[in-house]
Each structure stands twice: as C-alpha cells, then as structure tokens.
Image: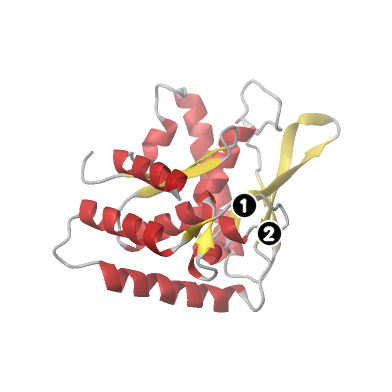
Amino acid sequence: MKSFISFVLIIISFFSFSAVYAEEYYSDEYREQLFELYDCLDKQITEYETTEQERVQLNIGDIKVACRGYEVDGAVSWNDARKIVAMLCGKHPRFLSTVNNIGYYYDKQTPELITVIDLKRLAINGSYEETYNVLNAEADKILDEIIRDNMSDLDKAFAVYMYLISNYNHESAADSNNREPDTIYGILINKSGACGGFANTYKWLMDKLNIPCEICNSRSKGHIWNYVKIDDC
C-alpha cells in the first residue's frame, strides 16, 4: 500500500494532456505522428467498445510504428505507441482492456515495422455491456458519496485519491494469465488491483467530474500512473 500512496501523490503535480508530448522531448513532426496514431486508434476502439468482440486488431494505416527493440527514422517508437494505448484504455472504460494485453503483428519483409496492433479485452462472465453498466453504477455511487457541490477541483481530485487508497487493496499483476488487477473491473468488482487498475479507475472518475486527466505508462519502470490538470496549472 505504501508504494501505491507514493505513486498517487505524484498526480497532484497537475500536468495537462499536452505535457505527455511536450515540445522539449519531441519534434513538431513527431508529435504530429503521435496525435495521428492516437486519433487512428481512438476511432477504432470507439467502434469496437460497443461490440462483444474479445480480441481486436487495430489497423495503423500509413502511420509508421517501430517494433519493440528497433529504432526507425520517421517511425513512432513502440514505447510511445504503448503509452497511447494505455491512455486509450483509460479513456474507454467500456472497452475493458489494459495496455498489458497489447501485442502486434509485422510483415516478414519489414520486421522492424508493425503492421497491426493486437489488443485483447478482459475475459469476463456475461456481456461487456452488462458489466459496464454494473461498473458505471458503482462509479456513480462512489462520486455521490464523496463529492459535494462546494468542492474545488483540487478537493475533488484529492477526495477520489483518498477514497481509492482507503477502500481498495493494492496487489501485484504479476500473473500474465490474470489481467483483472490492471483494470477497472479489478478495482470496482474485486476490490483490489495493481497500478494499472488504480490509474484507469482514477481517470474514469476524473472524466466523470470533468477534470482533465490522462494516463502515463512506462514499460521500463513497469508502472502506470496519472497526470491531472487543475485550473490553469
């Protein structure tokens, strides 16, 4: 629990979405590619999330994305592509997936470049729509309990943080065959989860409160956390 508390406090540094693609880290051309990839994948996940399809292949079109371990001029790195998928898993709670369920395909003639991103949804009993309705009702119940009209955005952000660390257990997602701890399902249904589950749940609750929030993913650190924007900070 201590490690999770330390991680959540970082979100009170208040970053905007654009901070993830800050100019000092990326060229304008590269940032354009990142936003293009984000929009491309966002559109497809939006279409898939209302279906009951458990495994989907996301077409990246003409956007160049490098395979893991490759550096290709003019291509989005695999690490940055993963960050985008992590953001989109948080943006689409109905899709019920995690960045740790991502893979890809490549053409043998160009093994350094991805052709399709493969993304699995959480295996559940029942339909995704029914499960989403249960999760949505639970999320609304939490906010009804802890949020008051006279609260500032900072008060709301901190209230949600305190509620999550006080009411749900932190656990490892070391078992690659069980990704529930990495998802909203693990937190709101099983009452415990790993960093990915907390980050996705926190973002969803922030979205419901209309407080700008994004997810950041670091494969090298094996960690997922949130950026939150409060007022004009």
Q: Quadrant of residue 64?
A: top right
State if disc 1 and disc 2 touch (CB < 8 Å). Answer: yes
Type of amino acid under label 1:
Ala
Type of amino acid under label 2:
Asn
| Residue visible at 66% across and 71% down in the picture | 124
Q: Position of residue 229 (x, y in %)?
A: 29, 44
Q: Is residue 166 above or below residue 67?
A: below
| Residue visible at 54% across and 66% down in the picture | 185
Using the image, tell me which numbered label, if any, was put on residue 43: none
* N-term mark: 2 or 1: 1
106 displayed left or right of 206? right
Disc 2 to disc 1, how far (Cα)? 7 Å
| Residue visible at 43% across and 35% down in the picture | 20
User: In terms of depth relative to the viewer, which is nearer, 87 or 5?
Assistant: 5
Q: Position of residue 141 (x, y in %)?
A: 36, 75
Can residue 226 be seen in the rendering of this structure?
no
Q: Position of residue 170 (x, y in %)?
A: 50, 55
Total numbered labels: 2
| Residue visible at 19% across and 68% down in the picture | 148
Residue under numbered circle 2: 178
For the rendered model, the colour scheme is: secondary structure
Residue under numbered circle 1: 173
